[in-house]
Amino acid sequence: MTDLEIAQSITLRPIEEIGASIGLSRDDLEFYGKYKAKIPLHLSEPDAQKEKKLILVSAISPTPPGEGKTTTSIGLCDALNQIGRKCTVVLREPSLGPVFGIKGGAAGGGYAQVLPMEDINLHFTGDFAAIEKANNLLAALIDNNIQSRHHSLGIDARSVLWKRVMDMNDRALRRIIVGLGGTTGGVPRETGFDITAASEIMAILCLAENFDDLKQRLGGIFIGFTFDKKPIYAKDLKAQGAMAALLKDAIKPNLVQTMGGNPAIIHGGPFANIAQGTNSVIATKMGLSLSDYVVTEAGFGFDLGAEKFLDIKCVSAGLSPAAAVLVATLRAIKYHGEVSLTDVHKPNAEGLKRGLVNLEKHVENMLKFRLKPVVALNHFEGDPDGEIEQVRNTCEKLGVQMSISKVWELGGGGAIDLAEKVATISDENHTKFKPLYDWDWSVKEKISRVAKEIYGAEAIDFTAQAKRDLRKIERLGLDKLPVCIAKTQKSLSDNPKLLGRPKNFIVTVRQIEIAAGAGFLIPITGDIMRMPGLPEIPAAVHMDIDQNGEISGLA
């Protein structure tokens, strides 16, 4: 059966039953139908979060379809509950762009999914729509002020980089001209659209800890300069109050369920190649308030999502994982051994041997943070036993445990061994992780540390534009912010064609963007796509709905 058919075959529990399993009464929940609910912020208890166990799930450098981090996270949560650990999985929300594009949904797969699968992948509780509206309200206020005669701040339109967003892959909107149509149509200028998941508002929502923090971060969004070079922030437009009002429900995390009938909190969805790539701080802390173990995942490979999860989110929010899981597949390992994507499902011991260097580098990176990882080998039908043993032998040499994960096929029952290993490491861990750098370092030092230690770069080159950006950041007093490096997910380097474990390469920083509201800087390496396009045959063409409202074709 397809993922959708499997999801539709499951009898869902009423959401109040799921809430009751973590101590929530019916009156505690804000219902969105029978199977979804919002959790009010006041239910997050700082004292209740102490001594709870946070488990981070990441992956090796992925193939285009991904390696199953979300599927593994969901299955691991169900398995931990099966072995008697009270666990909640906390995940990001899917973006509609990939759902209708090439990757399909992001609610897990097989018998390790979060439900209701269709709702989660299509609109869910409207969080993305609210983020889109808050983003576009600021864009409208900016253009309105540029047009204004009597209340103008003197914004230089040429310095404004804030774009509008929508939650759809639409390459035609990447670069547009606004303000056409004469004096009543505004001031003509070049701008464009990003996808909603790439909006700074998304990053802000996922790092804010309460409404006051949210408003302060929204007000701190850097917009541009006046004609006399004065910096302008969203607070200068008095935008933060109305923007926060649009986010009044979106800031509350969403409660749903896994196929195993266990609680799942899903909230926020920033991309990992342009933002921090993980669910909200509020959702993570809510999970820690309501259960003893929380499983969460960080986007793409460890070099992207997990590094940002640790150096930005965890430092900002005072979180520390007790254990970490590194998801790998034989297919991805062979892909990094330069086996073509069309042949990675075929036995190829030599290709696997070449590609294991990618796994080795990610394990080394995890150890740099004082995290003791378990490698979860996401199993596919037909995976050769000999190749599985190759991976196991490599893990033994690295001094880390390996577990075969069959959650796609068996749900939580396919991750019992993984759950027992993770639970043991979590229970025995009493040390905090070690960040890779100090926020007080110079921007160059922070970028260099990540690029050399995590990516394996020989050196870092800053273009003339990047050097100008560094001077601007220092003038604005923003040089103590952490760095959220924008880089391809396809390689440890900034060149997507360099597979495996590249060496002797130079990372080129083309420019450095300011996300002052979110609280980080974005060094841009390579070509980073913030508004993806649809593939030649989009996933959307296979979707339909019948007379009874039954959806089909959703992957």
Image: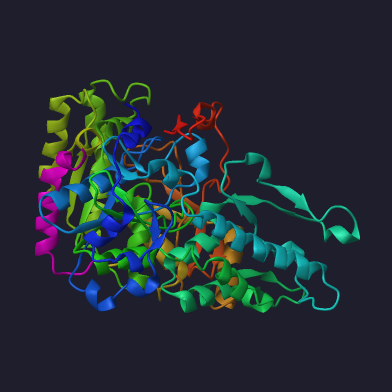
Query: Would residue 346 be found to the left or right of residue 233 on screen?
Result: left
Tell me which residue sits at (50%, 29%) in the image: 546
Q: What residue is shown at x 19% (from left), y 43% (from top)?
A: 412
Q: Nearer the viewer, residue 379 or 223?
A: 379
State the image quarter where residue 85 is shown: bottom left
Residue 229, x across and y down, in percent:
72, 75
Residue 106 appears in which quarter of the rendering? top left
Residue 314 showing in the rendered view: yes
Magenta stretch: helix, strand or loop mostly: helix
Question: Residue 392's x, y, as percent?
Answer: 13, 38
Camera-side residue of 551 and 469: 551
Q: Position of residue 161 (x, y in %)?
A: 66, 60
State left or right for residue 158 relative to residue 461.
right
Figure quadrant of the C terminus = top left
- Among the 4 quarters of the image, the one containing residue 61: top left
Residue 261 vs residue 27, the one in the foreground: 27
Which contiguous range is marked in magenta? Answer: 411-433
Magenta segment: does it hold 179? no
Q: How is the image coloured?
A: rainbow
Give the residue drawn at x 71%, y 67%.
141
